[in-house]
Image: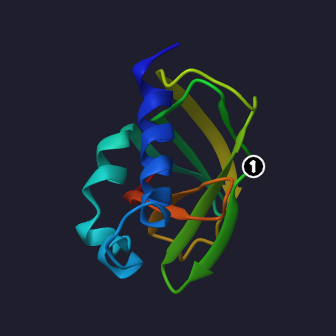
Amino acid sequence: MSLAKFTLAAAFALVAIPAFADAPPSDFDMAPPAEQAEGASMLHDATATRLSDTQVQIKFTVDGGACQAIDTPETTATADTLAVVFPSRDTAEICTMQIVLIPVDVTVDAAVAIKKVDLSLKAANGDVLPLGKLMVER
């Protein structure tokens, strides 16, 4: 079990803190992607490579919880950017808080106009954690 899964689990746990805090939930709202430091620090060795006029390969490693899995991404294209949201799920009800590196290697459909990829993780509770943006390489 590695430190990566613990980080993802801890990040997702932070989303639940407002329910237990005395301050109003608005004090804990997630920052926009450009201001989100936690998500960016979870992402390692990220690349987006164009394989053809219709496909882009996305590879990265993310810090996650020891009992979490990342599923097939959901994509939405807007102008030259492809938003890619990776749903995550718990693989056990009770788990250690260890962090592990979770490798991700997927190929997604992407029109030739797509030049950027915006990566996010969706927690099992539906909260979305921005990871970062990548330029699509040839």
Q: Is residue 84 visible?
A: yes
99, 20: nearer the viewer: 20
Which of the 4 quarters of the picture holds residue 34?
bottom left
Q: As drawn, is 58 to the left or to the right of 109?
A: left
46, 6: nearer the viewer: 6
57, 87: nearer the viewer: 87
User: What's the residue at 42%, 53% (across, down)?
Assistant: 14
User: What's the residue at 59%, 36% (across, down)?
Assistant: 104
User: What's the residue at 36%, 79% (across, down)?
Assistant: 24
Q: What colour scheme governs how the chains and residues are painted in the rendered image of this protein? A: rainbow
Mark 1 Cα within 10 Å, few/some/many (few <14, many 20+)? some
Number of marks drawn: 1
Q: As drawn, is 63 to the left or to the right of 111?
A: left
Q: As drawn, is 41 to the left or to the right of 55?
A: left
Residue 47 screen position, x and y as percent: 43, 44
Q: Is residue 15 above or below residue 65?
A: below
Q: Is residue 54 visible?
A: no
Residue 27 screen position, x and y as percent: 30, 76
Seen as rendered, the residue at the extreme front is: 22
Which of the 4 quarters of the picture holds residue 122?
bottom right
Which of the 4 quarters of the picture holds residue 41?
top left
Seen as rendered, the residue at the extreme top is: 1
User: What's the residue at 56%, 20% (across, down)?
Assistant: 96
Check disc 1 and give the amino acid type. Answer: Thr
Q: Which residue is mark 1?
A: 72
Residue 94 screen position, x and y as percent: 69, 27
Residue 64 screen position, x and y as percent: 51, 34
35, 118: nearer the viewer: 35
The local secondary structure at tag 1 comes to loop
Q: Is residue 114 above or below residue 69?
A: below
